[in-house]
Amino acid sequence: MKLIRAFFSAAPKYLLWLVMSTIFWLWIFTLVTNTTAEKKVTLYAEVPALEDPGLAAELEKAAPDSIKMVQAHSFDYFVFQSGKVKGGDIYIVPASNVEEYLPDFLPLDLTRLPEGLSLYESGGTAYGVRVYDAGSGEGAAKRYISYTLPGLAAEDYYLFFGVESLHCGEPDAAAYDVAAYLLELP
Amino acid sequence: MIFIASRVRSWYNTGMMNEMIELYPADAVRRETRRYKLWRCFTVSFALAALAACVVLVCKTNTANAPRMQWRVCELSAVSGCVVIFLCKHFVLPGKREILHLRTLRDEERQAVSGQVSLLPGKISIPGSVRIRKLQVRTGEKTRTVNIGCRFVKRLPKLPAALTLYTVHGYVIAWEVRHEAD
């Protein structure tokens, strides 16, 4: 009892330490798990559920040597408006929201993708590739991405490339490599 | 921190026995210094080991395990830091204060105060030093207060009692109590 009372007598110091150490280690992990946009491919997915560390680790296998890491994050349109998300390379968005995002997506370079894909076209230009077919329930990387949840209406999902991406052409097309790999993931 | 008081007994022809309780024996500073260094060494070693473990976990971080590692490091750092604060607060710093306190009392001339001794309520923390209690010594019409380290209070005889206290700078360093001989 005396020991417990003694322990709690320094409660403010413990609380201060908890806050300071947590901030410090979060900062360290931000440094360790992040790098500049030139050295990473970032995927944002507006999906009901995403197992982001697993997907990112899987996609890193397809990244060229110039890419140090792949990041995968969930997002929604509200976060997209904040600007940070606009610097992403690959986006997976539901068909119902595509029109809102379209000005921030690049037209596809079809020579860098496998043939026979279902495309999203606007004004005669292909912008996206279908990654989930709501009709058949088939989709890419379903081990990591949940495209539907019970109670939610199923819809198609498409993959796009961000207009600010540094990896969709010169000097490298790492985003296309990663996307092509993702499309083949079970 | 337990001091083993040196007891000096002397027999008088009156059939009474005087027992002298020394709170700060001659080797007290040496023993306290050794105890303080051991606690300090243990605390520093523990902190360094925890830090090394955190660094190892950070180095083993990859894309797949980053969130899990982040939680582990935060938990390890938080728990070990709290343990270090606890050790510092209750073992390292009190030991250091005790040594400084002992050094001020060492080799000084002691004064004897005899009378009816009673314990005053309330503990006092002296900034940067030991925690003390106040003793009131009533000698005839005169009343005087002296200080005693908190950890020695348990060893006082049942108060109020007639005692001879020996003090240095107002701190009790020994007392003498008279017993009936067996």
Image: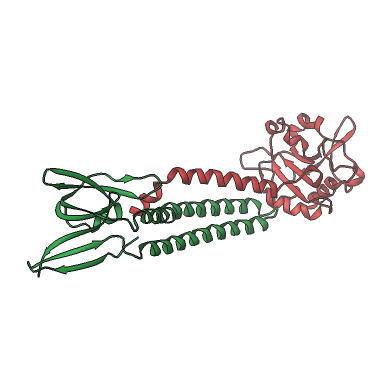
Q: Would you place residue B21 above or below residue A177 in this image?
A: below
Q: Quadrant of the C terminus of chain B?
A: bottom left
Point out the residue furthest to the right here.
A111
Point out the residue furthest to the left here.
B14
Residue A126 shown left or right of residue B80 in the figure: right
Of B106 and B182, nearer the camera is: B106
Residue B12 shown left or right of residue A128 in the figure: left
Of B125 and A112, nearer the camera is: B125
Place of residue A86 in the rendered image (x, y in percent of width and height, measured from the top left): 76, 35
Observer able to see residue B117: yes
Observer able to see residue A138: no
Q: Would you place residue A166 above or below residue B4 in this image?
A: above
Place of residue A23 in the rendered image (x, y in percent of width and height, measured from the top left): 59, 44
Q: Would you place residue A54 above or below residue B49 in this image?
A: above
| Residue at the image point whose x is 53% and y is 61% from the top | B45
Residue B168 shown left or right of residue A60 in the figure: left
Place of residue B100 in the rendered image (x, y in percent of width and height, measured from the top left): 40, 54
Q: Colour of chain B?
A: green
| Residue at the image point whose x is 60% and y is 59% from the top | B52
Of B2 and B65, nearer the camera is: B2
Q: Quadrant of the N terminus of chain B?
A: bottom left
Quadrant of the image occupied by residue B48? bottom right
Residue B161 shown left or right of residue B63 in the figure: left
Place of residue B140 in the rendered image (x, y in percent of width and height, measured from the top left): 11, 46
| Residue at the image point whose x is 76% and y is 49% from the top | A70
Counting every numbered tag in the picture gives 0
Q: Which chain is red?
A: A
Q: How is the image coloured?
A: by chain
